[in-house]
Amino acid sequence: MRDDVRTLAAGFLRSAEYYPQRVALEVGGAKLTYQALYDAAKSLSKAILRNLSNDGPQLTAVLASRSVTAYAGVLGSLLAGHGYVPLNPSFPPERTNAMLRRSECRSLIVDAAAQSQLDQVLVNLTEPMVVILPECTGEIGEYTARWPKHRFVDAGELEHNSTDAPQQPSAAANAVAYLLFTSGSTGVPKGVAVAHRNVVHFVQAAVERYKIDEFDRFSQTFDLTFDLSAFDMFLAWERGACVCCPPRKALLNPAQFIRDSRLTIWFSVPSVALMMRQLGALKPAAFPTLRWSLFCGEALPADLAAAWAEAAPQSIVENLYGPTEVTIACTAYRWGGLSAPECEHNIVPIGYPLAGMKTLIADNNLREVPPGQEGELLMAGPQVSLGYWRDAEKTADRFVVPPDTELTYYRTGDRVCRPTSDGPLLFRGRLDHQIKVQGYRVELQEIEALLKQEAGVDLAIAVAWPLRSSSAGGIEAFMTAGPVHVDAVRERLKARLPSYAVPRKIHVIDCWPLNSNGKIDRGQLLKLLEAGL
Amino acid sequence: MSSGSGEYVRSLILARLEQPMVEMGLEPAAITDDFDLLTSGIVDSLGVVELIGAIEQQLGIALDLSELDPESLTTVGPLSRYIETQYLQSVHARRSA
C-alpha cells in the first residue's frame, strides 16, 4: 500500500459517491447534500490550484464561521491537497493577521460575514495571496485596486461543474491536514500541525467506537479553530451522516436546537451544559433523540454528567480528553452507574487511552512514577501530531523520547494520578499557567507578556477568575502603575486577543503579595478578588 | 412598581449592568427594549448566566428559561417580560398551594 492513499478527504469523497442525495451539512438555514457540498468544495479547490504557484506550504487559510463557505472551504482545501488553517472571524483581525503571516499560507478563503475584515487581515503580507470570496458578487474591483499584489477570485469566477468524476487529492500521510493556532506563552500564537495520518487514525477508530451510520446527526458546537470541530465533521462525513451547525447565539441555550435538529450525537465543552442547567433546560428526558453525549475541553463535573444523563436517557455520556497536539481526543471515560466513587472532588475521570494510544505518567526526568503517585501525563501513539509549525525548539521541548522508551511522547503539561490497578486516569490540574476559559485554552503568560508590552510595565500577572467547577469564567489581571492608562491598555488587548482571553478587569496595585520564595503569590491575588478587592 | 413586573425586572437588569454600560458610553436609562446585551458586548455568555443567577436571587425564585429562544434571552425587553411571566406564575402557584 502506498503511503499517500488515504487522506482526510477520502471519507467524504466516498460518502459523496454512495450518498450524493443525503444531507451532509445544515448551516444558516441551508441544507446541503453531499453532492452540493462536494460541488462547492471542488470549485474552491480548483480556484486554489489554478491561481497558486507551487512554492510555499501546501496550506489554505479559511476565514469563515458557521457558513457554507466555512465547510466548503475546509473540504476545498483538502481536495486541493492542502491542509486547512481555520481562522476565526470573531477574533481581532490583528491576531488573525499574525496567524496568517505565521502560517505562510498563500491562499485564503473568506465568507461574506468576514469580508469586512479583509483590509485589516491583509496588511503586511510579504507574499502575494490568492483570496477567494465565494459569496462576493460585487466590489472585487475595489479590493484589486487596493491590494494589487494579491489575486482576488469572486463568485462569478468560481467554476461550478458537477459532472467530473470525484477527484482524489493526493497528499503524503505526513502532510499537514490542518494547522491550528493556540495561545502561546511568549505572546505569539503557536501553530499545531496535525498530519493526515493522525486524523485518519482517530476518525477510523472513532466511527467504530461510536458506531456511526448515515442516519446520525451531529451537533457542531465548536468553532473551526477548536480541533474538536474536526470530530463532528469528519466522523459524520466518513459515514454519510449530517453535521448540524447552529448559529453562534443558539449555543447560549441549545435545547431547542437539539430537539429541532433531532440530533443523535451531542458534543460540546461542559460549559455549554452548565449554562443549559442554569437556564433550567436539563429536564429529565428532554433530549430523547441523543444516542451519544460527549464532552471534552475542560473538567466535567460529576453532578453535571448525572443531570445530562437524565436529560438524555437514551444516550451514553462520555468524558473525552485530549490536547490539540494529540489530535482531537486521546482518552475517554464512560459515565455510568458505578462512576460516582471513581470521581474526585466532583470531577469525572478522563478515563482510559483510546485505541492505539499509550500513556506514561512521569516525573520531571521523564521516568515513570509509581502507581498511586502524581506525575505529568505523556501520550504516545498514532495521534501524536507533527509538532509546532516552524518552531523546532518548542517541538523538541514538548515532543520527547523518554529514557527506557523508543516512542515519541507528547508532554501534555497535565498533572494526573497514575492509577493503582486498572482504574481510570484522574485529572489533577496543570503543571504550568495554562488555563481553560469556558473551554478555550489560554496561556496566562501570553496575556502577561502582552500586558507588559502594551502598558510599558515590568510586572503583570493574569489569573483565572471567577473559578467554576469546570473551568474559569474569565480572566482578571494585576499590574504595576505605568505610563499608559488602564482603559487604553485594555483596548489594546482587545485588539490582540480573542474576547474570552481579554482580562475582564485590570487592577493596578503597588504592593504585591509575595510567597516564602519571594515570588508573587497568585493564591493571595485570588484572595484579593474573592474579597471583592 | 411591583416586584416581578417587566419594568421591575428591567430595572434589575440595568442596575446590575450599569457599570459595563457606562464604560461603553451608554446611558442605562436610554436603553431600549430591543437592546441586545450580548451582541453589544455588555456581557459575554458567562455574563448572561451570572445575570440570570443574580435575578433569581433577587426575586427568590428558580427561573426556567429553557423555552426562551436564544435571541430573546439576551434582549432586554423580551427577557424582562419572560421573567415577569415566570415570576407571576410562581407567585400564583404559591398562593394556590
Image (spheres, coloured by chain):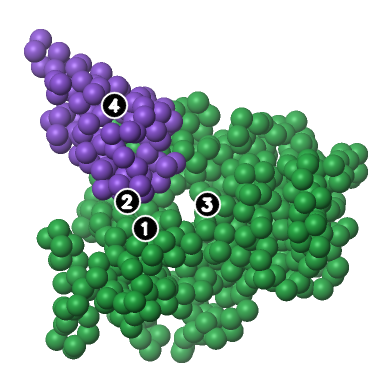
Chain colours: A green, B purple
* Image-based side of A46 in relation to A404, left or right: right
The residue wearing badge 4 is B80
CA separation in Å, label 2 and label 3 = 21 Å
Measuring from the top left, give residue A269's x and y in whole percent.
41, 50
Which-is-in-front pick, marks 2 and 1?
2
Mark 4 and mark 2 in contact (Cβ < 8 Å)?
no
Residue at label 2?
B23
Which quadrant holds residue A472? bottom left
Circles 2 and 3: CB distance less than 8 Å?
no
Q: Are marks 2 and 4 on the same chain?
A: yes
Q: Chain of mark 4?
A: B
Q: Residue furthest top?
A: B96
Q: Residue at x 32, y 58 (%)?
A: A504
Q: Chain of mark 3?
A: A
Q: Please, what secondary structure does the residue beneath circle 4 have?
A: helix
Mark 2 to mark 4 CA distance (whole Å):
23 Å
**Label 2 vs 4, first from the N-terminus:** 2
Q: Residue at x 46, y 78 (%)?
A: A186
Residue neighbourhood size for the residue with mark 3, other residues' Cα within 10 Å, grouped as few (<14), some (14–19), many (≥20): some
Which quadrant of the view contains residue A508? Answer: bottom left
Q: Along the line of sight, which residue is nearer the eye, A374 or A261?
A: A261
**Residue named by callout 1:** A437
Question: Which of these two is toward me, A103 or B18?
Answer: B18
- The Cα atoms of the two marked residues, 2 and 1, are separated by 23 Å
Q: Residue at x 60, y 58 (%)?
A: A87
Residue hosting label 3: A90
- Within 10 angstroms of label 4, few (less than 14), some, or many (20 or more) residues? many
Say yes or no: labels 1 and 4 on the same chain. no
A299 relative to B54, above or below? below
Residue type indicated by callout 1:
Val
Label 1, secondary structure: give it.
Answer: strand
Q: Which quadrant does the C terminus of chain A fall into?
A: bottom left
